[in-house]
Amino acid sequence: MSFIAGVLLFVVVVGLVDRRLPWPSAKQQEVGKW
Amino acid sequence: MVAGHFGFAAMVKSRERSAPLWALMLATAWLDIVFVPLLLVHRESVQPIHAGYAGLIIHADYTHSIVGMLALSAALGAMFLPRLGKRVALVIALVSASHWVLDLMVHRPDMPVLPGNLGNLPYFGLGLWNHPQAAACVELVLVAAGAIMYWRAAMDVSTRADRNGRLASFSAAMIAAFGLLMLFLDYTS
């Protein structure tokens, strides 16, 4: 269970850090492509 | 295989930049996430055949059947459709399905076609876990390639936005560090 908790923590922390990067928005990109 | 799946998610993020990394990582683990409650209620199970890394036959006859995988992947994609749009929702569904493809490589033949192994059709699994060092090498390559590809893409978007690359490097370093830690803990378990 501690391994699963560690994996969840990894996803949350990395996900939060990644959100601060200036990636293009999914919806904006879709408007241009579809 | 845990770390390898997350390495693959980071690789996809580098190519499909508008897909949130957390959603890709959720997608790559989706079949295993659904597996956990089924394991707890004994609908699915694990059978240890030796101690340590790769020492399991996994009887995940619902979540890891081909039909089950397709249904779960489609459901996850549909959940993200309103929030992220068609393209990213499709990518998320495909990343979920990639879990089965990577598992196909390493599992011993324990993944059925139909849920509950209806019809007693043949099980799938190429059995790389019979060679634990080779399986660990594949995971290591996925983690390293994922972290490097992610770092390059993150640096690129940071440069385009006139930002320095410190956060991009930090994020990529976290992916590499956590991935290697997961692989180490899995391999030495």
Image (cartoon, coloured by chain):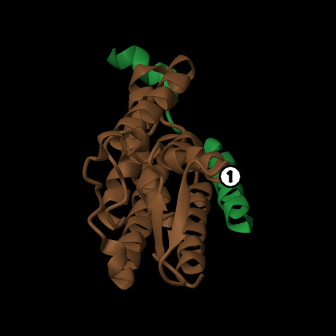
Chain colours: A green, B brown
Res. B109 in view:
yes
Q: Is residue B108 above or below residue B184?
A: above
Give residue B145's position: percent from left, percent from top.
38, 65
Q: Residue at x 58, y 47 (%)?
A: B43
- Per the image, label 1 sits on a secondary structure element best described as helix
Horizontal and vertical percent for residue B154?
49, 51
In the displayed structure, B147 sits above or below B141; it is above
Residue at 33 percent across and 14 percent down: it is: A34
Look at the image and tell me in which quarter the C terminus of chain B lies: bottom right
Q: Chain of mark 1?
A: B
Residue drawn at (62%, 52%) of the image = B42
Label 1 packing within 10 angstroms: few (<14), some (14-19), many (20+): few
Could you tell whether B104 is left or right of B71 in the image? left
Horizontal side of B57 relative to B121 (left or right) equals: right
Front position in the image: B171 or B35: B35
Extreme front residue here? B119
- Location of residue B77 in the rendering, given as x and y in whole percent from the top left corner: 47, 28
Give, as a three-letter code, the residue at label 1: Leu
Residue B140: quadrant of the picture = bottom left
Image coordinates for residue B110, horizontal then vertical, percent: 37, 59
Q: Which residue is mark 1?
A: B40
Instruction: Please report the residue visible at 58 percent of the width from the left and 43 percent of the height from the top.
Output: B34
| Viewer can see residue B162 | no
Question: Toward the viewer: B150 or B158?
Answer: B150
Give the number of callouts. 1
